[in-house]
């Protein structure tokens, strides 16, 4: 599910976040909620602390649930995170391919997660 693309560093006022499912603190996550070709998708500015596929899958599921709870329609979702000087994506395979093909991160919402 992971892929990478050579894009500019992730920006935004809150920047890149690493999150664990077990955290009890409130964390603000930048996200993009976009619609392309009739598909609503979400991209979250976050990575799991463990940085494993299992941890990323759990985090993506949690953030997708939170986005839907906040009223957003999400058909597909991905995480966007820095790996060295590159931005990598983890999530729905066809969305990851689309994002890795030149999508520049810009954030449309902030999601509050506890």
Image: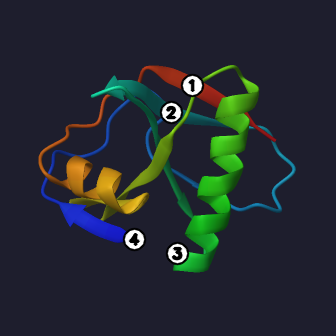
Query: Mark 4 or mark 1: which comes first in sequence?
Result: 4
Residue at the image point whose x is 31% and y is 56% from the top: 94
Q: Rounded to the nearest whole Å, what is the CA distance between mark 2 and mark 3?
A: 18 Å
Q: Which residue is mark 4?
A: 1
Q: Quadrant of the C terminus?
A: top right
Residue at the image point whose x is 71% and y is 42% from the top: 65
User: In terms of secondary structure, where does tag 3 sit?
Assistant: loop
Q: Residues within 10 Å of mark 4 (few under 14, many from 20)?
A: some
The disc at residue 51 is 3
User: In terms of secondary structure, where does tag 2 sit?
Assistant: strand
| Image marks 1 and 2: residues in contact by CB distance under 8 Å | yes
Q: Which residue is mark 2?
A: 30
| Image marks 2 and 3: residues in contact by CB distance under 8 Å | no
Whole-percent x, y for residue 12 in the image = 38, 29
The disc at residue 110 is 1
The answer to which image quadrant residue 87 occupies is bottom left
Q: Rounded to the nearest whole Å, what is the CA distance between mark 4 and mark 1?
A: 24 Å
Q: Nearer the viewer, mark 3 or mark 4?
A: 4
Whole-percent x, y for residue 2 in the image = 36, 70
Q: Furthest-right residue in view?
A: 24
98 left or right of 18?
left
Q: Is residue 97 above or below residue 32?
A: below
């Amino acid at each position: 599910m992971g892929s990478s693309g050579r894009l500019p560093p992730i920006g935004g006022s809150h920047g890149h976040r690493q999150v664990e499912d077990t955290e009890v603190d409130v964390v603000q996550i930048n996200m993009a909620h976009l619609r392309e070709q009739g598909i609503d998708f979400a991209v979250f500015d976050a990575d799991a602390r463990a940085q494993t596929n299992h941890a990323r899958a759990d985090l993506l599921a949690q953030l997708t649930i939170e986005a839907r709870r906040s009223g957003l329609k999400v058909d597909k979702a991905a995480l966007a995170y820095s790996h060295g000087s590159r931005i990598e994506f983890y999530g729905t395979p066809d969305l990851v391919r689309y994002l890795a093909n030149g999508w520049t991160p810009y954030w449309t919402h902030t999601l509050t997660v506890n």
